[in-house]
Structure formats: structure tokens, C-alpha cells
Image (spheres, helix red, strand yellow):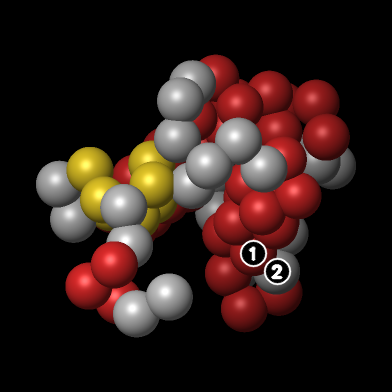
Amino acid sequence: MRNDELLRRDLAVYIFNDSVTRDEILRINHDDFEADYFVYAYIKTAIRRKYYWSKMFKKMMKYVCIYSNC
């Protein structure tokens, strides 16, 4: 798929209902060593700029609070 064929909301790429892709986006922005283990507010801003999916903030909060070792 070419860049101009991506489904977007504003400038953010829409991520379809694919939990693997969504979890990978969260993992990269939270758990990755290069991401410097950011807090929820930073993750929320960083991901919101690039991606969009339904109920994304709820999923982010759940990931940060439950599935990570914060």
C-alpha cells in the first residue's frame, strides 16, 4: 500500500482492529529501551500524533497500568 492510500484521521494513520499491531505500537512506544520507558502522558501524545484506533486511550491506559512493569 502506498502512503497516499493509507486511511487517515487528520494526519494519523488509522489502525484497523488488529490487536497484534496495536500492541506492537504500544510496546515500541513504552517498553523499547530506545523509547526510554516513557510515562502514560508522553506515550499518549506520541501515539496520538501518528496513529488512531477506536478506544485507543482506554487501551493505552490498560497497557501501561496492567501489562507493563511500571
Residue 62, position in %: x, y? 68, 24
Residue 11, position in %: x, y? 18, 55
Circle 2 — which element? loop
Which residue is more in the foreground, 52 or 68? 52
Check disc 1 and give the amino acid type: Ile
Q: Describe residue 66's horizontal placement relative to residue 60 as left or right.
A: right
Residue 30 appears anywhere in the view: no
Q: Describe residue 16's horizontal placement relative to residue 34 as left or right.
A: left
Q: Describe residue 40's horizontal placement relative to residue 33 as left or right.
A: left
Mark 1 residue crowding within 10 angstroms, few (<14) / some (14–19) / many (20+)? some
**Vertically, is 68 above or below 36?**
above
Front position among marks 1 and 2: 1
Mark 1 and mark 2 residues within 8 Å of each other at the beta carbon: yes
Instruction: Give the residue displayed 76% in from the left and 49% down from the top.
Output: 20
Q: Quadrant of the N terminus?
A: bottom left
Q: Describe residue 27's horizontal placement relative to residue 60 as left or right.
A: right
Instruction: Give the residue displayed 34% in from the left and 80% down from the top.
Output: 2
Mark 2 residue crowding within 10 angstroms, few (<14) / some (14–19) / many (20+)? few
Q: Which residue position is annotated with label 1?
A: 28
Instruction: Give the residue displayed 84% in from the left and 42% down from the top.
Output: 69
Residue 22, position in %: x, y? 63, 46
In which image quadrant can residue 61 be found? top right
Which residue is more in the foreground, 70 or 68? 68
Check disc 2 and give the amino acid type: Asp
Q: Which residue position is annotated with label 2?
A: 32
Circle 1 — which element? helix
Residue 70: give its label: none
Residue 40 appears anywhere in the view: yes
Which residue is more in the foreground, 7 or 19? 7
**Vertically, is 13 above or below 14?**
below
Residue 57, position in %: x, y? 47, 26
Q: Quadrant of the C terminus?
A: top right
